[in-house]
Amino acid sequence: MKYQTFLGSEVKQSEFDKAFFHFIPVPLEKSVSYGKGTRLGPSAILKASWALETYDGISDPSKSGFYTHKTVNCNKSIEKIYSKVNEKISSVLNADKFPVILGGEHTVTALAVKSVKENIGNFGIIHFDAHADLKDSYHNNSYSHACAIKRVFDLGCPIIQFGIRSLVEEEDLFRKKNNITFYDASIFFNNKKPLIKIPDNFPDKIYITIDVDVFDPSLIPATGTPEPGGLMWYQVINILKNIIEEKKVIGFDVVELAPKKNDHSSDFTCAKLIYLIIGMIARKVL
């Protein structure tokens, strides 16, 4: 059986212009530095989505219409991959629809955000991750997954980080010097209810990027660089809920799932996460 569409077991794919949510699989794996397998992430998420219930406990987000695009060919140069990602995202945004990017290593975010910015203009980035990803270059590669958020910063996007617990000193100094707001993982355990405040001057429009290693490895072990001490399920869900209620989300991605044999839980957790985010957005804008 081929799992080519999101939640295809329950939802018939809508026509392009009748679907609000557009899924764009980008199975990029060029710069992973530890565990491998991100190229398999998008297909694993699509497969796991077939086991979801359409009712998310509050509503049925599938009624908004789903369209899953053909997978982007990532056996090319970054420039050519960007060209294809940009083509797909531009077509979605120009139709006043909503892009959901399925990665792939975190470099996917740099490509997606560049495209969204060319189409929409200014917006902020909400970044969930175990790692700061603020290196300017890693292993002589400025488009390494470890540089994804630095590339986003270079585009002029304000950034708020959640869940960071692994970074080099230069990255920590960089985010402090450049007024990047951050809520590292430790504060969620040192303070059970940390006060999370979005800066007053932060843009109303936001793009959300979720590297799944933001979660504790007990929830999603299938990722390239799992870090102990991650956020738990409802911590992330509640942060997302509050931000989505306050801001206008213009797109999001979920990246860095590296599926492992006999681990269905990680794949399903990622699919469930995506569906719950879609529900939050749909209930606000549709």
Image (cartoon, rainbow, N blue to C red):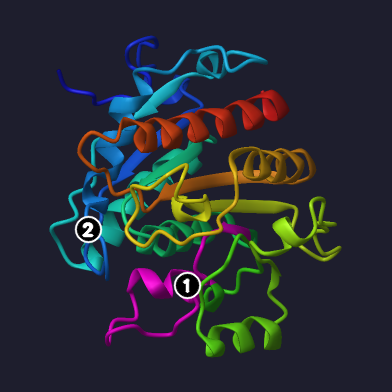
Residue 155 pos. (x, y %): 53, 73
Look at the image and say whether residue 97 sits in the magenta stretch: no
Of the two numbered discs 2 and 1 on the same chain, state the one appearing first in sequence: 2
Which residue has dot 2 on it? 36
- Quarter of the rendering occupied by the N terminus: top left
Query: Judging from the image, what secondary structure is the residue with disc 2 in?
Result: loop
Image quarter for residue 45?
A: top left
Residue 198 location (% of width, % of height): 80, 59
Over which residues does the magenta segment extend?
125-152
Gap between marks 2 and 1, in whole Å?
17 Å
Residue at the image point whose x is 43% and y is 37% from the top:
270
Classify residue 89 as left or right of residue 69.
right
Specify whether residue 6 is in view: no
Q: Quadrant of residue 139?
A: bottom left
Q: Nearer the viewer, residue 110 or 168?
A: 168
Residue drawn 44% across and 34% down? Answer: 269
Q: Is residue 286 above or below residue 266?
A: above
Identified by mark 1, the residue type is Asp
Q: Which residue is mark 1?
A: 133
Vertical relation: 29 (above or below) 222? below
Residue at figure coordinates x 50%, y 78% from the top left = 134
Quadrant assignment for the C terminus: top right
Amino acid, disc 2: Lys
Asked whether 138 falls inside the magenta stretch, the response is yes
